Amino acid sequence: MPAEFFGSLSNHKTPPTYKFFNGNEWVESKSKKTTDVISPIDNHVVGKLQVVTTKEIDEVIEKAKRAQRQWEATPLNQRIKIMHLVADWIRHFEQYLTSLLTAEIGKTHDEAKGEIVRTADLIDYFADEAQSLKGETLDSDNFPGFEKGRIAMIERVAYGVVLAIAPFNYPVNLSASKIAPALLMGNSVVFKPPTQGGIAGIHLARIFEKSGIPDGIFSCVTGGGSDVGNYLVSHDDIDLVTFTGSSDTGVAIAAKAKMVPLVFECGGNNPAVILPDADLHLAAREIVKGGFSYAGQRCTAIKYVLGTKKILDQLRPIILETLKDMVKPGDPRSPETKLVGPVISESAAIHIEEVIQEAVKDGAKILTGRKRKGSLIEPTILTSVKPEMAVVKKELFGPIVSLIEIKSMDEAITIINNSSYGLQASVFSRDEGSALNFAKYLKVGTVQINGSPQRGPDHFPFLGVKKSGVGVQGVRYSLESMSRLRPIVLNKPQ
Ligand code: G3H
């Protein structure tokens, strides 16, 4: 069945070369250029993706622009039906998509499966929620200086052509979380999957196509960020850019994009603050889960822990014990492996190793971990880390958690608020009232009390401040982000 459904996407060679979707058919690029998708597990080439030309991008965007009005005019219930069908197909191919994710990006089986199941549920939720998005009417009755009787009818309408750029760490989920709300709100979508994860992205695109999206409304273009990505983001006919990826790339895209709305989820280097009365066993479990899931390659991963000397002295052995229970690094295809498989590439692993070495040179100590074999890095905990070290200052997408000793809770606030990132923070305390008060001082998108940072549940608002993001996502919030208000004012004839 997968062969029948997905068979025509590639040329079936080993490794297969995949086509791109130009809005109505799967084709090879005229560029005759491809880019390799390399598995982080053993460096084998999983497949090859087309590098599309600028002319092909122009054509895809032109089609998207032309088809959009008709799509927006399509009754919402029809768009909703299509989305439910997408969710059903994703569930139907759960196993197949799961194994693709493991091969392409090295997620463990459970994590990959979790991403697929979550995506289907998310799309269903989007489709259900779209029903309840309502406009409103306002009248001029109470506003000083305006006569009675003006009425504003305010509707939510599409922006037009949305560009959706997804990252490698959730190539299915963070693609669908952009594509589905944009389509539901009547936009057409140009989807640019990441290179690693691009094969899964192409399969997702096939599912959208097969579920009944009309010609031109949805396309999937592939190629590197430097040429294809840059051309897309600065294109005159893109009406909104939604992107997940590193903060550096986010800043670069924002500088190139025309004056269009941006919905960005960027990097994070999320702290966990341990207040003196915290439940340390709970904190340790959340730190290990938060720091090491998917080898620390989540924008919501815990990157550093702040506590006084007394607290950290007690916490260190508990974390080590918890780590032994909860984490088993290894081949992501093995059922033995828990949380830590390889990072996305050997070059990424080498970079992480260098940053750890630099921290050690500057006085940090290795509590556990550090060794690297290919793309696999042992779960690493550093102590005696200073906030100005690169291991804390820059988002490091790897299985590393740094412990930072502080003198006071005020110092914790200063460290967190001085960071250029501001995605999430965790605060641990048995006294929820104190944690709540503390949370209000933190300049981050979301504070989690007694839990690790995370995006889900997916209908909660998800946002970053500073270099961690622009705009708000989450089921209803994404539907709102992907649409604008259109007031039409009925004036009273004089
Ligand atoms: O990497 C960024 C993702 O949005 C994080 O999602 O918290 O569910 O792992 P997550």
Image (cartoon, rainbow, N blue to C red):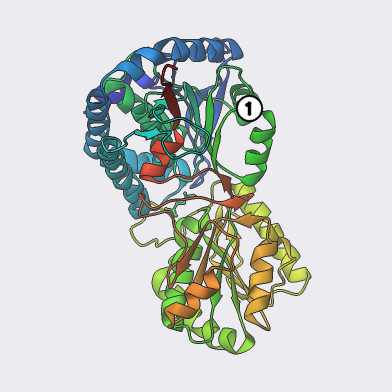
- Work out whether residue 9 or residue 139 is closer to the camera in this orientation and state it: 139
In this view, the residue in front, 352 or 236, is 236
Q: Quadrant of the N terminus?
A: top left
Towards the viewer: 60 or 221: 60
Residue 466 vertical position relative to residue 489 in the rendered view, above or below: below
Percent position of residue 336, x then y? 35, 62
* Amino acid at pointer 1: Met
When the figure is inspected, residue 295 is found, relative to residue 319, above or below; the finding is above
- In x, y percent, where is residue 330? 45, 59
In the rendered image, which quarter is residue 133 located in?
A: top left
Q: Is residue 322 visible?
A: no
Instruction: Say which residue label 1 marks.
Output: 259
Secondary element at tag 1? loop
Q: Is residue 400 above or below residue 97?
A: below
Q: What percent of the width, then of the height, locates residue 357?
A: 72, 64
Residue at 39% across, 61% down: 337
Relative side of 361 to 187, left or right: right
Q: Is residue 268 visible?
A: yes
Quadrant that contains the C terminus: top left
Q: Where 349 sits versus 226, above or below?
A: below
